[in-house]
């Protein structure tokens, strides 16, 4: 068996939390993309890891190595572990696996989402509960905590497109569409840096290029966070005349498919804030910005600090 002497991801993340230093977006996506590829390879071989957690990820020259395959063959929650190991399993395990309700490969996808949460929020998954008994109660009754301030920080530091990727990952691993993330799609998007250009979502997949109308009548809950953030960013980065010009442009069209004049004030300001996307030489307003206009929150910053 090969020996790896790198640092485990849980120690790396604990160090970030102690110092208050946020893991970079690029580092986080590289880790998640490679872990997604590794888990997808296991699933292709009909293997479910069942214990994906930061302590089982070794960083070798900055790249993650998924370790500890000691529980892949069993069908029930392993109890023959030390208290510390068992607590780790409780914290990161999918609820259906934790409570004996049956599981499949989606259990690993959920655990990947828990790791993503720790990297993007810079706090431990279910951090308020450190005793195993209270942790079990919390896992049964409490939702995963995500705050508007988390969205604001990511958008300000990395841009709106990066926030969109973060919320998509969390939505399709931990929230409404839990464990529906297509692992190979995430790995491919990371390899090709989709967030640096035009991309869209199709179910649990990230696809390159401009997609169909991404603002349906029923906007998913995770996207509502994007809508609030788009409103706040518009209020911060677009001048009053820029907001008025963009509102007139939006009100004159029934769909989002229009070309923005690159010389227009609102396009220049919106591009800088990450609220416009480039595609085929044209500029398109971000779908969340259009949704903000449709629901009447465009250009307001009331979501900040909520």
Image (cartoon, rainbow, N blue to C red):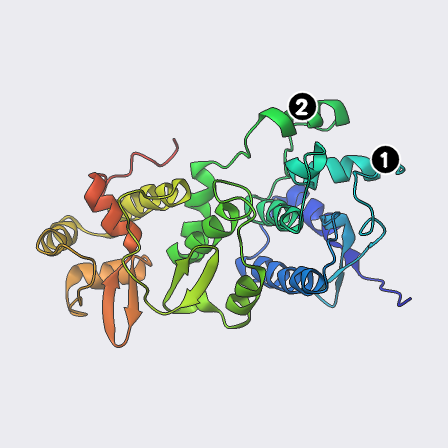
Q: Is residue 195 left or right of residue 261?
A: right
- Residue carrying label 2: 137
Image position, residue 163 (x, y; %): 43, 52
Q: In this rendering, which labeled residue sits more in front, label 1 or label 2?
A: 1
Residue 284's place in the image compared with 290, above or below, is below
Residue at 52% over, 64% down: 185
Q: Position of residue 212 (x, y in %)?
A: 29, 61
Question: Which quadrant of the structure image shows residue 194?
Answer: bottom left
The residue at the point 53 percent across, 50 percent down is 180
Q: Earlier in the sequence, mark 1 or mark 2?
A: 1
Q: Quadrant of the N terminus?
A: bottom right
Which quarter of the picture shows residue 218? Answer: top left
Q: Is residue 4 above or below residue 70?
A: below
Measured in 3D between alpha carbons, the distance from the residue under mark 1 to the one under mark 2, in whole angstroms, is 18 Å
SS at circle 2: helix
Q: What is the tally of numbered marks visible in this picture?
A: 2
Tell me the residue at 54%/69% (across/down).
Answer: 188
**In the image: residue 216, left or right of residue 153:** left
Residue 10 place in picture, x, y as percent: 73, 48
Res. 66 image quadrant = bottom right
Foreground of the two, 105 or 26 = 105
Q: Are marks 1 and 2 in contact (CB under 8 Å)?
A: no
Query: Label 1: which residue?
Result: 79
| SS under mark 1 | loop
């Amino acid at each position: 068996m090969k020996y790896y002497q790198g640092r485990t991801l849980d120690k790396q993340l604990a160090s970030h939390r102690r110092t208050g230093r946020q893991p970079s977006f690029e580092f986080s996506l590289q880790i998640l993309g490679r872990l997604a590829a590794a888990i997808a390879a296991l699933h292709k071989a009909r293997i479910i890891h069942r214990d994906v957690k930061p302590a089982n990820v070794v960083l070798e020259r900055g790249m993650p190595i998924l370790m500890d395959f000691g529980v892949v063959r069993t069908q029930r929650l392993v109890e023959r572990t030390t208290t510390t190991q068992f607590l780790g399993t409780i914290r990161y395990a999918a609820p259906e696996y934790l409570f004996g309700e049956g599981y499949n490969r989606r259990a690993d996808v959920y655990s990947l989402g828990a790791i993503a949460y720790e990297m993007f929020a810079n706090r431990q998954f279910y951090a308020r509960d450190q005793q195993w008994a209270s942790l079990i109660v919390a896992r049964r009754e409490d939702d995963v905590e995500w705050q508007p301030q988390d969205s604001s920080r990511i958008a300000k530091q990395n841009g709106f497109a990066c926030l969109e990727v973060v919320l998509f990952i969390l939505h399709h691993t931990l929230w409404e569409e839990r464990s529906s993330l297509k692992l190979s799609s995430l790995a491919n998007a990371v390899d090709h840096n989709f967030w640096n250009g035009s991309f869209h979502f199709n179910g649990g997949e990230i696809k390159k290029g401009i997609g169909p109308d991404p603002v349906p009548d029923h906007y998913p809950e995770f996207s509502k966070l994007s809508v609030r953030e788009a409103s706040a960013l518009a209020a911060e980065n677009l001048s009053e005349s820029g907001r008025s010009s963009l509102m007139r442009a939006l009100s004159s069209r029934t769909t989002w498919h229009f070309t923005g004049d690159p010389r227009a004030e609102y396009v220049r300001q919106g591009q800088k804030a990450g609220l416009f996307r480039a595609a085929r030489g044209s500029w398109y307003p971000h779908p969340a910005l259009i949704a903000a206009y449709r629901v009447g929150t465009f250009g307001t910053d009331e979501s900040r600090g909520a």
